[in-house]
Amino acid sequence: MADKKLYEYEGPVKIFEDTVNENWSGMTYAISERQARNNLTYQYKRQRGLIPATKVTLTGNIVEAQ
């Protein structure tokens, strides 16, 4: 099994095509950047009480934490 790394995100969030948050930040452990993006999107939906079918897009860069 691959080792999980800590990833962080700080940047804008879009719901459907509208920017709803200019500077949201979150952190997660994941095995890849793709999985980290999925985890962070899930986190955002849970924090805001959104249903799973809501299209949330993190438009900034996800970076591996140092």
Image (spheres, rainbow, N blue to C red):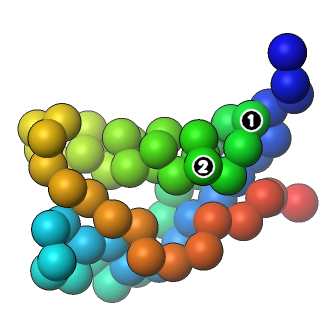
Q: Quadrant of the C terminus?
A: bottom right
Residue 22 visible within the image: yes
Q: Is residue 34 left or right of residue 20?
A: right
Label 2 vs label 1: CA separation? Answer: 8 Å
| Residues at marks 2 and 1 touching, judged by CB atoms closer than 8 Å | no
Q: What is the crowding at mark 2: few (fewer than 14 residues within 10 Å), some, or many (at least 20)?
A: few
Q: Position of residue 34 (x, y in %)?
A: 60, 49
Q: What residue did someone put label 2 on?
A: 34
Decide if residue 48 is on the left or right side of residue 44: left
Q: Which residue is mark 1?
A: 31
Q: Callout 1, which amino acid?
A: Ile
Residue 49 visible in the shown view: no
Rendered residue at 85%/15% (across/down)? 1
- Amino acid carrying label 2: it is Arg
Q: Residues within 10 Å of mark 1 (few under 14, many from 20)?
A: some
Identify the residue at image location x=38%, y=42%.
Answer: 43
Residue 5 percent location from the top left of the image: 80, 41
Taking the image as shown, residue 53 lies to the left or right of residue 60, namely left
Q: In the picture, residue 32 is in which quadrant?
A: top right
Q: Could you say which quadrant of the image residue 46 lies in?
A: top left
Q: How far across and down, in percent of the image, does residue 48 sit?
A: 18, 49
Q: Secondary structure at mark 2?
A: helix
